[in-house]
Amino acid sequence: KHAGLNLQIHSKMRSHFISEYLTHWTGNGKDDNQGFNNLMSILSNCRLLLSDGAPHFRTAWSGAHLRMTCFTDIPHHLSSEHCQRYGKFGIAFKKRVLIDYGANPVLYLTSLKKDDAEKVYNYICDANTGKIALNSEVLESLKKFFGFVQDYEYGTETYYYEREWRILQNNLEYCEGSVIQPGKYDSSIQNGKKQYYFQFSQNDVEFLIC
C-alpha cells in the first residue's frame, strides 16, 4: 500500500519537471498564421520535414548539414517562454512512440568540454573521408551518436532549457522494415533538391496544441 502511494507521489512530482510527451512546435521565426498553416500541413500528410541543423555541432558529413526534426519534453504548463520563440502551435506524441522511431534526447556540452568533443568530431570526419581507417559499423554508430550533441550555450543564448529531443536522418533506418511502421525515411524532389521527412501515423498523435 505504501509502495503504491510513494509511486503515485513520485509520478506526480516527475510530471512537474518532465513531460510524458514530445512536442514538435511549428512556429519558429514565424507569425501565428504561418505557425498554424505549418501545423495543418503536417497533419494533412502526417509528415514532419527534416530540416538542416544549425552550424555548430549539427554539421554533418560530406559537407552537408545533418537533417533532423526536433521536439521538446518541457511540461506544457511551463512552455510559455519556449512558445515566444517557437510559436503557439504544436503536435504532441507519446514519448515512448517516438523513442521506438529513434528519437533521443540531446547531450548538452558546456564550453569546457567542447575541445574534447571537437577532437572526437574531427576524428569522425577523418574516418569518414578515408584519412584514417575505422570499422564502418563503428563509424556509423559514432555519426549517429554525434548527431545528438548540442551546445549548452551558443554565444549569449542558452539551449539547455529547451530540453531538446531529435529524430535524425541517419537514425531513421533503424525502423526500415520494422514492425514499427511508418517510421522510415523517404525522399522526394522539391525545388531541385531532395526533401526528407519523418512519416508518422494519425494513431501516433496524442493531441494538438493551439
Image: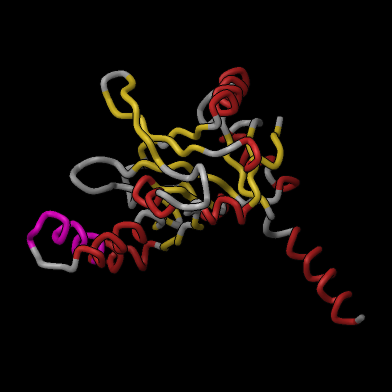
- In depth, the one of 91 and 75 nearer the eye is 91
Give the residue at x 19% y 42%.
63
Tell me where residue 94 appears, x and y as whole percent.
65, 50
Q: Residue furthest right?
A: 1
The number of discs equals: 0
Q: In the displayed structure, does residue 34 sit left or right of residue 57?
A: right
Q: State whether residue 98 is above or below residue 210.
A: below
Tell me where residue 166 appears, x and y as whole percent.
47, 49
Which segment is the magenta one? 120-131
Tell me where residue 192 appears, x and y as whole percent.
26, 20
Magenta portion: prevailing SS class: helix
Q: Residue furthest bottom?
A: 2
Q: State whether residue 193 is above or below residue 4.
A: above
Residue 149 part of the magenta-drawn span = no
Rendered image quadrant of residue 71: top right
Q: Quadrant of the N terminus?
A: bottom right
Q: State whether residue 83 is above or below residue 190.
A: below
Q: In the displayed structure, does residue 19 sit left or right of residue 134?
A: right
Q: In the displayed structure, does residue 163 sit left or right of residue 122?
A: right
Give the residue at x 47% y 57%.
106
Give the residue at x 79% y 70%.
10
- In depth, the one of 189 and 59 nearer the eye is 189
Rendered image quadrant of residue 127: bottom left
Give the residue at x 71% y 29%.
210
Tell me where residue 60 appears, x and y as whole percent.
27, 47
Rendered image quadrant of residue 120: bottom left
